[in-house]
Amino acid sequence: MNKYYIYIFTVLFLFGCDKINFSKKANKNPALDNAVLAQLAKIKNKFNIAEINSNKAFSLLAIQRNKPCAALFYSDKSVPCVYSQKFINNLSQSMSNDVLFIQINLSDNAVKSLGTKYSIFSVPTLILFNHGREIDRLVGITNIKKYKTITKK
């Protein structure tokens, strides 16, 4: 029975009706948890990195979660971003239980406003969020050791 509610919620979420709360308990918000699960199920890839394609998805996965999230802002037209992607892929596979890795392509018009909101002036930029707050950031190409230190904070 719960499986059907998740399917219904996923369809409603995809059509922009995510404000509907099907919860019987007023003090708990399972709609948010279901939305996060639905978004993760839709965008996970083999490297355990979620590709963000909307501001709403970013808010659900990075800001409203109570777990650490590493957000990589990149451009698919940038050579340094392509180079740093292999480091992020390796890191996301080794730390997938501790940190959720998401990536935001700033070449996409739907999420360009996120680059402005978080003052992204250079790509690649890796920002670590915890409980909705920015903890740290790395800008430009760095080695894998620096990526590991930022995600262990």
Image: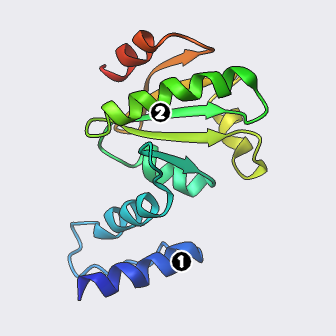
For the N terminus, which image quadrant? bottom left
Q: Quadrant of residue 100?
A: top left
Q: Quadrant of the C terminus?
A: top left
Q: Which residue is drawn at 44% across and 42% down?
A: 47
x, y percent for residue 39: 46, 61
In-front residue for pair 5/96: 96
Q: Please state which amino acid type lies under the numbered disc 1.
A: Cys
Residue 81: tell me if it is visible. yes
Q: In this view, does 148 lie above or below 78?
A: above
Image coordinates for residue 27, horizontal then vertical, percent: 21, 67
Residue 103 against residue 42 in the figure, above or below: above
How many numbered tags mark residues here?
2
> Residue placed at 37% from the left, 77% from the top?
21
Question: Which amino acid type is marked by label 2?
Answer: Asn
Q: Is mark 1 on a helix, strand or loop?
A: loop
User: In x, y percent, where is residue 128?
Assistant: 44, 28
46, 49: nearer the viewer: 46
Image-quadrant location for residue 8: bottom left
Q: Is residue 119 above or below residue 10?
A: above
Residue 122 in view of the camera: no
40 and 20: which is toward the camera: 40
Q: What mark, if any, has residue 17 been given in the picture?
A: 1
**Viewer-nearest of labels 2 and 1?**
2
Which percent across, then down, holds residue 147? 44, 17
Instruction: State the mark number for residue 89.
Output: 2
How many C-alpha atoms fall within 10 Å of the one at disc 2: few (<14), some, or many (≥20)?
some
Asked where in the image residue 29 lies, by quadrant, the reply is: bottom left
For the point 68% across and 34% down, the residue is: 115
Q: Is residue 102 left or right of residue 110?
A: left
In the figure, is residue 103 to the left or right of 19? Answer: right
Other residues around mark 1 within 10 Å, as few (<14) / some (14–19) / many (≥20): few
